[in-house]
Amino acid sequence: MRAAPALPVPAPLDTPNNMKGGILVVLPPGYGPAAGTPPSDRSFFSDSAVDRGKTLAQFVSWFPVWGIPLATTRMTAGNFERSFFCCEWPSSPVSGVRGPQLVQQYSVKCAELAAAIRCREPRLVIFLSCYLWQAANTSEGRLLLKDALGAPQEPGRRISPVRLGAYAQRWEKAMVLALPLPGPNTTHQFVQSVGNAVQGAFRQAAVLPEASSDPLIEQASGCLVIDEKASIRRIRTELHVTEERARSLLERLRGRTIDG
């Protein structure tokens, strides 16, 4: 028996923070909550009491790994949580093709995405599928998005040192992140590996909360051994960072030990 199709993703509550200059999360259709009774109320994007489907719930769970605080319970939401909104794009699933073949099919539908962006002028756009981002970067996609996003100011910069691709790209009117669709392949290791770059994109878009912390500091603490040089080598190997970055993390861990 075929599973019932997923419901559309429930829209977050409209707020002054997401009506202009917020954070747009874009995902393909078909990844909303399981078919059933749709939520009767609206709330902020990361409210765990509202079922927006397993895909977005997994995406929300990445924020603590990145060192970015994101409230998930009511009465704790601030301006950051209220700045998110989302859309499913394209509006209906593309049938008959899979994988990279989807890029061209998505690219001709970029006018739909342009309308969503033009309406709210987000500072940051996060694609939860690199195929969606690749479609936006085709010649046809860029043409259809020009009024909404302007032109790309750089090629997409790969931000993941592991097998799965993830990219950051500055466009004229917004910062853009492309991440894989959350699922079994987006392991904890992958999420950790992009934390520093994700924070950088949030910072460039001027939407990074002040309470954010270094996403690698806790991971680095698990790499310490008695010998300093061995600790630096292990931090470099396990966190895929330069020797300079590894040494900086080690010094910060020493300072934290002395202070606390």
Image (cartoon, grey):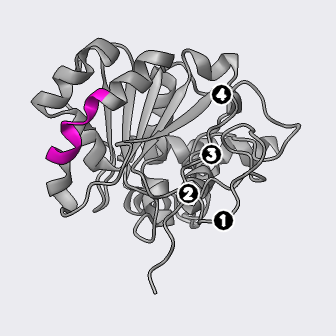
Camera-nearest residue between 143 and 134: 143
Expressed as whole percent of the image width and height from the top left, the position of residue 34 reads: 59, 66
Residue 114 covered by magenta stretch: no
Q: With 69 as the anchor, is 35 left or right in this view?
A: left
- Vertical arrangement, residue 206 with respect to residue 184, above or below: above
Q: Quadrant of residue 26?
A: top left
Camera-nearest residue between 71 and 9: 9
Confirm whether residue 189 shows in the render: yes
The residue pinned by badge 1 equals 36
Label 2: element kind? loop
Q: Label 3 to label 2, Cα distance in Å?
A: 8 Å
Q: Look at label 1 and name its amino acid.
A: Gly
**Numbered circle sitting on residue 7:** 2
User: Callout 1: few (<14), some (14-19), or many (20+) C-alpha neighbours within 10 Å?
Assistant: few
Q: Are marks 1 and 2 in contact (CB under 8 Å)?
A: yes
Expressed as whole percent of the image width and height from the top left, the position of residue 122 reads: 48, 21
**Numbered circle sitting on residue 10:** 3
Expressed as whole percent of the image width and height from the top left, the position of residue 55 reads: 52, 58
Mark closest to the chain's N terminus, 1 or 3: 3
Which residues are drawn in magenta?
A: 104-111
Label 3: element kind? loop
Mark closest to the chain's N terminus, 1 or 2: 2
Confirm whether residue 232 shows in the render: no
Q: Label 1 to label 4, Cα distance in Å?
A: 35 Å
Mark closest to the chain's N terminus, 3 or 4: 3
Q: Are marks 3 and 2 in contact (CB under 8 Å)?
A: yes
Q: Quadrant of residue 146?
A: top left
Q: Label 1 to label 3, Cα distance in Å?
A: 13 Å
Which part of the image, by quadrant, shows the C terminus?
top right
Q: Look at label 4 and name its amino acid.
A: Pro
Predominant SS of the magenta segment: helix
